[in-house]
Image: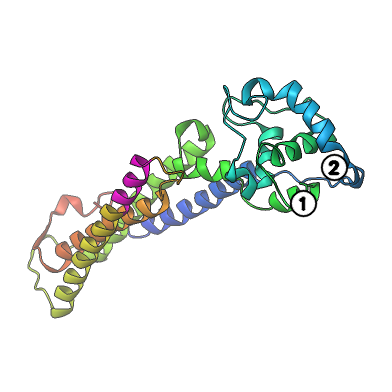
Amino acid sequence: MERNDAVMPWVAIVSAAIMWILLLFLFNKETAPEPVVVDQAVVANISKEWPTVGQQVYTANCSGCHGAQGQGVVGPKLAGDEKILKDPVYVHTIITKGKGGMPAQTQLKDNEVYAVANYVLNSWGNKIEEPLTPAQVAEGQSKVDPAVLKNRSRFVPEDIKLPEIFLVTFILVLLTYGLIGLYSVWAEGMELHPGIHKVRSTPLAVLGMLTTLGLTVLFSVLFVRQMVTDYAGWAAREPVMPNVTAEGFYAAMIVLTLALAIGLYKKYFMDGEVLVEDASGEFPW
């Protein structure tokens, strides 16, 4: 009996691809940096203003949380902070957009933002070669913000909105249906013949099975090693984010290689049976 559901898996996978494109569009639109306007008047006054205006703005708005000498109180320590010296634009981002318990300092004018940022970057043991300018901020904004990267890697629920949850769920359902359907067509053929079907493995099938199992072991070892490395860094309290991307990749490859091994086993090593009433079902499994 000819299958009546052989086309639907491809429809599901194509639909999932369309949904994935929409998801990426929504996510990239949400995290795209806002363009920065370079005000030449601000640039000309930055070097003159930051020692005086910057100190005044810091004393009035920042010292209560970060300390008069940047020693840290409620907010983090700023004195001798190598992180902000390596990425001065990050200071501008935190001042204008806020982070954690620190709100965005929207009451500050542009010149005050650059003045206080350069004051922090050039005080209490901090020192940068050139003052932070709008041109540097504009260049830095073309990159993905470190805070955005951190949120992406952690993938915490509060950073996912309802449209993203819906699309991800729908994509997973479509992909699951499509992949199981394609596997069913591949394993059982376009036509279903009622009865028990004997299979005989071939040397190529045995090689494929051994290769797949070997890859499963390899990715398992890599996954465990990555987890041990990340855990050791966390236990040592090193300022390094866990490599969540590598962990996820290895875990996904373990699942995929195991699924492939099961598929090869059912196709080439396990006898199958087709029932008459299953031949006209709407679902491939």
- Residue 130 position (above or below residue 157): below
Image location (x, y in percent) of residue 181: 30, 56
**Viewer-side residue, 86 vs 159:** 86
Task: Please tell me in which quadrant of the rendered image residue 178 appears.
Answer: bottom left
Q: Which mark is residue 46?
A: 2
| Residue 173 falls in image quadrant | top left
Question: 109 or 32: which is nearer to us?
Answer: 109
Does residue 47 appear in the picture of this structure? yes
The secondary element bearing badge 2 is classed as helix
Secondary structure beneath disc 1? loop
For badge 2, the amino acid type reads: Ile
Q: Earlier in the sequence, mark 2 or mark 1?
A: 2
Q: Where is residue 180 in the image (x, y as percent from the top left)?
A: 29, 54
Q: Residue at x 36, y 51 (%)?
A: 248
Left or right placement of residue 264 versus residue 25 in this view: left
Q: Identify which residue, 173 or 90, lies in the foreground.
A: 90
Q: Which mark is residue 130?
A: 1
Disc on res. 167: none
**Magenta-drawn segment:** 226-236
Location of residue 269 by image quarter:
bottom left
Which amino acid type is marked by label 1? Answer: Glu
